[in-house]
Amino acid sequence: MCLLRKTLKVAAVALMMAAPHAHAASVGKEDYIRNPLPPGFQVIGTELEGPVFADAQGHTLYKWPKKALRNGDAGELQEKPTCDHNVHRENAGLMSPYPGGLEMPEVETRPSCAALWPPAYATDDAKPIDKWTVVTRTDGRKQWAYEGWSLYTSALDKRPGDVMGATELFHVAETGVERYPVAPKPNVPSQFIVNTSMTGRMIELRDGWSVYSNDRDGNNKSNCFDACLDGWTPVVAPAYTRAIGEWTTFERAPGVQQWAFRGKPVYRYNNDPKVGAQDGAENPGWHNLYMQKAPTPPKDFVMKDTMVGVVLGDSRGMTVYRYACNDDALDQLACDYPEAPQAYRFAVCGSGKETENCSQIFPYVIVSKGAKSDNKVWTAMYIDPKTGKRATADQPGALNVWAFRGRPVYTFAGVRGYGDKTTTDILAMAWGEFDGNRNGYRAMVYRDLFSKRDE
């Protein structure tokens, strides 16, 4: 246990000190494969997802792939858009134990799918180009599709580069049928992939193992030989490989070519215990490789070690939680942002007087005086704690709280004496339905040391 705590502490300190790495691209600079685009569409750099496709106004484009739920399917098939202007007033019973036919919360003001996810309409004379096609909606209008998936924007995205509609970042199961941003392929050799995480756009081998660079190496020159190779394996390029974008090769031994990213030789750590592990970065001078690093949280937050890994804490070190929610109507609308019905969140607070006590059980993380965010991911907003809805600055009782991707974040004071008491507590990690993924709370994990990654 002492060794585990030491390992976690090293990892937490490393994350706290991690300003964007010298070899990490700034937002909008991540390299990607350029293919033809329809007129008016563009590629925009985002702070978490890297480059994404956007419409002429800079609004991110999303898809809604069909997914099997416990009692049926929801989402869309390729070439068959179904997100329309029909308002679903009852749940569909897709997620047990609830039967279908129950009236939705705030049904009088419930928006349609197309109101929250405006279709990316195409003109009647629009022509397919490359992977972009034109599909016909049930109302007869034309809509753009990419690789067969019908495309939408999100009403939650207000500025170019916003990706507020996406939740793919957390890689969790049983969240309902989500929408995902549509993006060009990253310009990496076929041996590598890019995995979006809380820490950034991490580069990995295609089988999921992390890769690293070493400060002691020169530009396209390795200094890892002899004893160094006991812990590290150079990532060798196939014969006759050519440079690809920011990727080059160099001869580390006669007839042996090693990959380098932005001039830094690339390695695998022999002692990483599982796919996705980042243990190699605990060695001085070694770093995970990123296409771009994620923005750092404001000064009101710290990284800390817990039994699940390195998670976000508030200024006191208490665990910070995000709230996740997808409703159970056929259009699977998100219910985790302030404008959505708060009945779901109140229902999992754990008290018989949810609307009165929810903000006491899960207190909002308050913005301290003078604290600011230098990115779009973290923002401050005013919330009415009695309703959970957005408020104005001059509204009596309104709280100025931190939000991640437009959703407030919380700590866990607890109910009936059960709650986080120390900085190592993480008691609300799976609080709610389906381990907190469908309707509930989960800690904001920046480095998961123990759970198997969801594919």
Image (spheres, rainbow, N blue to C red):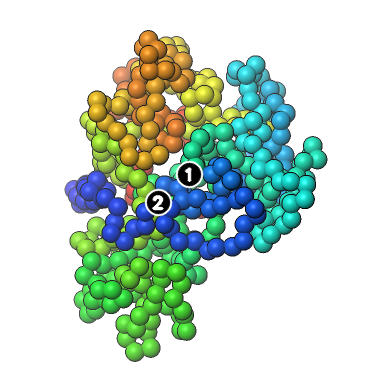
Name the amino acid type tagged 2: Val
- Residue 223 lies left or right of residue 140; in this view the side is left
Instruction: Work out how far the residue at label 1 is from the one at label 2, CA to CA, in angstroms.
Output: 10 Å
Instruction: Say whether residue 424 is visible.
Output: no
- Residue 289 lies left or right of residue 62; in this view the side is left
Badge 1 density bin: few <14, some 14–19, many ≥20, Cα 10 Å: many
Q: Secondary structure at mark 2?
A: loop
Considering depth in this image, is 384 or 323 the residue closer to the camera?
384
Considering depth in this image, is 184 or 16 the residue closer to the camera?
184
Figure quadrant of residue 16 = top left
Q: Residue 347: x and y, percent?
A: 50, 20
Residue at image x 46%, y 51%?
Answer: 45
Instruction: Identify the mark nearer the N-term, 1 or 2.
Output: 2
Number of the label disc, if any, that sits on residue 27: 2
Residue at image x 37%, y 29%?
Answer: 380
Residue at image x 53%, y 33%?
Answer: 156
Q: Secondary structure at mark 1?
A: loop
Residue at image x 62%, y 19%?
Answer: 109
Name the amino acid type tagged 1: Gly
- Circles 1 and 2, Cβ within 8 Å, touching? The answer is yes
Q: Residue 72: x and y, percent?
A: 68, 38
Q: Residue 21: x and y, percent?
A: 29, 56
Instruction: Say whether residue 85 is visible.
Output: yes
Q: What residue did someone put label 1 on?
A: 161
Figure quadrant of residue 140 = top right
Considering depth in this image, is 390 or 364 the residue closer to the camera?
390
- Marks counted in the figure total 2
Badge 2 density bin: few <14, some 14–19, many ≥20, Cα 10 Å: many
Figure quadrant of residue 74 = top right
Q: Residue 365: x and y, percent?
A: 33, 27
